[in-house]
């Protein structure tokens, strides 16, 4: 069983009270938000009372590019460098990988072949009028590109946090399973579907779904009082 005093938080959608309360009560070394953060102010301001107590890390979800404010309050906050998307970071002694965003058909909808391998390739076919702030359309800044997944596939981690779910969820993707296998992670968390669930499995990797505002330890113990389906 992995150690590490880290809490994993399901989609806040602008409501940070459960996270703040959980940090004050349990004093984790770090917390990781699983996307759809939608902070109404810069994220560092929303979480100012817990920043002296814990490290805050995050991945983005599909709703974090719904508006300019959603985007700026996350990607433009003082916690912008805590974005785990596409990388592996050792946090409280645990190697944690992140995959933010969702699959979108205009770019890649597994099991279909990708239409664009990278942001640069998409931009090469994207009309100037569709660009946002000189680059990708805002919506596609929360789209999963194959190059991000390929980069992660070549790395190793103890934990994977993704917004999309693996195939054990009815709306999940086998591509996330392939990433879990390639990275040889022991525990995988996902957000997006607002369901707190510990999926049955073969024991090679424990997969945990995080309900909205649910808080889980790395062992899959839910702390927020959200009912949990044990599979």
Image (cartoon, rainbow, N blue to C red):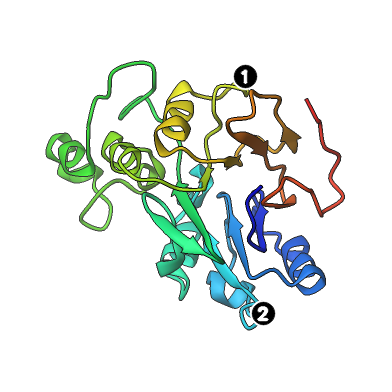
Q: Is residue 182 above or below residue 82?
A: above
- Disc 1 crowd rating (10 Å Cα; few below 14, some 14-19, many 20+) is few
Return the x and y of residue 212 as percentages of the image width and height. Answer: 71, 46
Res 110 → quadrant:
top left
Return the x and y of residue 195 as percentages of the image width and height. Answer: 73, 35
- Of pointers 2 and 1, the one earlier in the residue sequence: 2
In this view, the residue in front, 111 or 230, is 230
Q: CA distance from mark 2 to mark 1?
A: 37 Å
Is residue 169 toward the left or the right of residue 87 in the image? right
The furthest residue to the top: 112
**Which-is-in-front pick, marks 2 and 1?**
2
Q: Which quadrant of the rendered structure holds the C terminus?
A: top right
Kindly state the secondary structure of the residue where label 2 is placed. Answer: loop
User: Which residue is rendered at x = 53% and y = 72% of the image?
Assistant: 42
User: Which residue is rendered at x = 20% and y = 56% of the image?
Assistant: 134
Res 196 → quadrant:
top right
Which residue is denoted by mark 1 in the rendering? Answer: 170
User: Which residue is rendered at x = 42% and y = 39% of the image?
Assistant: 183
The label shown at residue 53 is 2
Return the x and y of residue 75 as percentages of the image width and height. Answer: 42, 63
Kindly state the secondary structure of the residue where label 1 is placed. Answer: loop
In this view, the residue in front, 80 or 71, is 80
Res 72 → quadrant:
bottom left
């Amino acid at each position: 069983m992995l150690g590490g005093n880290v809490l994993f938080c399901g989609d806040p959608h602008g409501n940070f009270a459960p996270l703040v309360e959980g940090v004050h009560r349990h004093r984790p070394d770090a917390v990781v938000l699983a996307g759809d953060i939608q902070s109404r102010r810069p994220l560092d301001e929303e979480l100012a009372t817990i920043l002296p107590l814990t490290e805050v890390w995050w991945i983005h979800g599909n709703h974090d590019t719904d508006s300019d404010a959603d985007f700026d309050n996350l990607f433009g906050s003082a916690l912008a460098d805590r974005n785990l998307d596409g990388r592996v970071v050792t946090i409280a002694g645990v190697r944690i990988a992140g995959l933010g965003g969702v699959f979108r058909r205009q770019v890649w909808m597994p099991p279909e072949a990708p239409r664009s391998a990278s942001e640069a390739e998409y931009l090469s076919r994207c009309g100037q009028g569709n660009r946002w702030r000189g680059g990708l359309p805002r919506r596609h800044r929360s789209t999963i590109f194959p190059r991000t997944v390929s980069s992660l596939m070549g790395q190793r981690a103890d934990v994977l946090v993704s917004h999309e779910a693996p195939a054990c969820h009815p709306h999940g993707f086998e591509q996330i399973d392939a990433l879990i296998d390639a990275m040889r992670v022991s525990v995988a968390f996902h957000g997006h579907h607002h369901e707190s669930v510990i999926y049955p499995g073969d024991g090679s990797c424990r997969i945990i779904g995080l309900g909205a505002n649910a808080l889980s330890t790395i062992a899959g113990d839910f702390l927020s009082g959200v009912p949990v389906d044990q599979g």
